[in-house]
Amino acid sequence: MVVNEPISGFMTVRQAATVIECTEKHVYNMIHLGRLEALRIGLRGLRVSRESISNYLSKGKGNYGTPELR
């Protein structure tokens, strides 16, 4: 049986990318670096914590790897 109901407090990588306004690849990188918390579901499923996204956005996305404009 497959249940397609959302898990409370979590969202898909695609949804997280939309909220953060970045690519899905960037979300995966942020999870790998520990900047976003995620929950593994089965072998391939991954859900991102809404709280970690909120914290990430409140701290500012940062300018990782981009030079400052002067």
Image: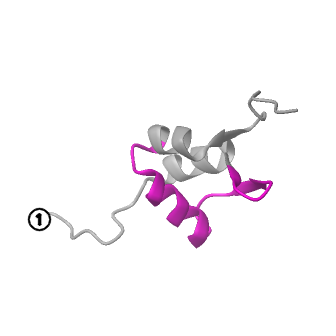
Decide if residue 48 is on the left or right side of residue 64.
Answer: right
Q: What residue sits 57% from the left and 47% below the top?
A: 13
Q: Position of residue 24 (x, y in %)?
A: 47, 52
How dense is the environment of label 1, judged by Cα within 10 Å: few (below 14), some, or many (20 and up)? few
Residue farthest top in this picture = 5
Give above or below for 59 relative to 30: above
Q: Is residue 24 above or below residue 62?
A: above
Residue at the farthest front position: 1
Along the horizontal axis of the image, is 40 left or right of 34?
A: right
Q: Quadrant of residue 54?
A: top right
The residue range painted magenta reads 20-46
21 and 66: which is toward the camera: 21
Specify the amino acid type for callout 1. Answer: Arg
The foreground one among 2 and 7 is 2
Residue drawn 81% across the image and 30% down it: 3
For this view, does 67 lie left or right of residue 35? Answer: left
Please state the total of marks drawn on the protein image.
Answer: 1
Asked if residue 70 lies left or right of residue 67, the reply is left
Q: Position of residue 25 (x, y in %)?
A: 46, 58
Return the residue nearer the eye: 23 or 65. Answer: 23
Task: Tell me residue 12's x, y (percent).
Answer: 62, 42
Residue pushed farthest right? 1
Could you tell me which quadrant the N terminus lies in? top right
Is 63 within the magenta? no
Q: Residue at x 44, y 53 (%)?
A: 60
* 43 falls in the magenta region: yes
Q: Quadrant of residue 7?
A: top right
Q: Please state, as top left, top right, bottom left or bottom right, where the C terminus lies in the image.
A: bottom left
The residue to which callout 1 is attached is 70
Foreground residue among 62 and 47: 47
Q: Above or below — where is 45 with respect to 10?
A: below
